[in-house]
Image (cartoon, rainbow, N blue to C red):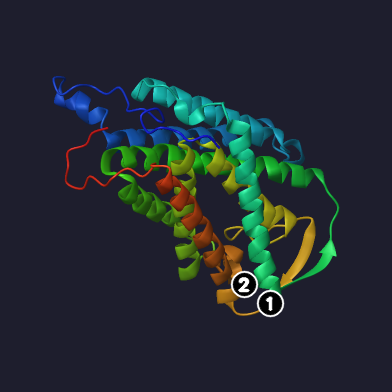
Amino acid sequence: MSRVSLDELPAAPNLPSLSTSRARRIFFSAPVRIVLGVLAIGLTAALGYAAIKAIAPLPAQRLVWPHLLMSALLLLVYVGFVKAMERRPLTELARGGAPAEFGVGVWLGAGAVSAAMALLAASGGYRIVAFHPWTVGIASALAEMLFVGLFEEILFRALIFRIVERSLGSVPALLLSAVLFALAHLGEGINALGLVNTALAGLMFSAAWMLTRRLWLCVGIHAAWNFTLGSIFSIVVSGHPAKGLIGGELSGPDWLTGGAYGLEASVVTALVIGALFMGLFWRARAAGQVLPARWGQRAIQ
């Protein structure tokens, strides 16, 4: 992956100067841009899927294509948001190196899940009991996980992390985006360890963003993690039951297996995600991609 200069990716937004009206400066301020961006992406996803469900009411009619369509629509809405609110080049969507970065992300995400499953099996907490054939449902799950990865990475990395980092620095942005990412996953059987692991995952995805200053690496990791966990190993993903190519059984205490929330609430996952975060953050820091904290300083960008 090529090293990216902070002066190039992503550039400072072209915001109103101090000589403009106070209302205009507030409208284009960092907090307002975050809120408007999150609303734009969230409403696009909600209304888009509602429209698709109305057009194709049967589940069999909604395989693969809705998720690919919605992924493309999310990108278009994000592009429109940046053009309207920040008026700058969309370097975070640069196509140069995108296939390689996405591919590395897929390798890291799938590898992290495989490592966690291997550790769990070695501890006696997992065993394979069956193998299932490939179905169109698994292909649809792949498209859905691509959408989920893109949706959450646009929200938490391209919007929240990026804008906060520009205003306050990398460490405050890491902490804030990780907390919000964890809170967004409340419910569905999550326990305290699951919440901690989700925050760790938020840190890890943000470190992937910092390393490249683009979406592709973190989207690849995110999508591959979810798909490998649910559609390969048939493990519950964030509280959602899954059936994949490999059928297995979990056994042992909840701190090991994750309980009702799945492997993402396991101490094994904490070790794997923590190690991946430290590796990515170390590389980002070595590449000079960590912005210093600016607590208490005036920052509107």
Q: How far apart are the alpha carbons under marks 1 and 2?
A: 7 Å
Q: Is residue 240 left or right of residue 278?
A: right
Q: State the residue in front, 171 or 300.
A: 171
Pointer 1 local density, CA inside 10 Å: few below 14, some 14–19, many at least 20: some
Report helix, strand or loop for mark 1: loop
Q: Residues within 10 Å of mark 2 (few under 14, many from 20)?
A: many
What amino acid type should be assigned to the residue bearing mark 1? Ser
Q: Looking at the picture, how far across and down is residue 105, in whole percent?
A: 60, 44
Camera-side residue: 92 or 285? 285
Residue 185: give x, y in percent of width and height: 48, 56
Residue of label 2: 257
Tell me the kind of residue under disc 2.
Thr
Residue 295: give x, y in percent of width and height.
Answer: 21, 48
In the image, residue 75 sits, relative to residue 289, either above or below, namely above
Confirm whether residue 274 shows in the render: yes
The kind of secondary structure element at disc 2 is: helix
Pointers 1 and 2 in contact (C-beta within 8 Å): yes
Percent across and percent down for residue 293 are 26, 47
Q: Quadrant of residue 10?
A: top left
193 over 231 or under it: above or below: below
Q: Nearer the viewer, residue 285 or 186?
A: 285
Q: Is residue 278 left or right of residue 109?
A: left
The residue under the point 25% across, 32% down is 29
Query: What residue did someone put label 1 on?
Result: 251
Residue 189 at least partly seen = no
For the image shown, how many numbered marks are present on the structure? Answer: 2
- Of pointers 1 and 2, the one earlier in the residue sequence: 1
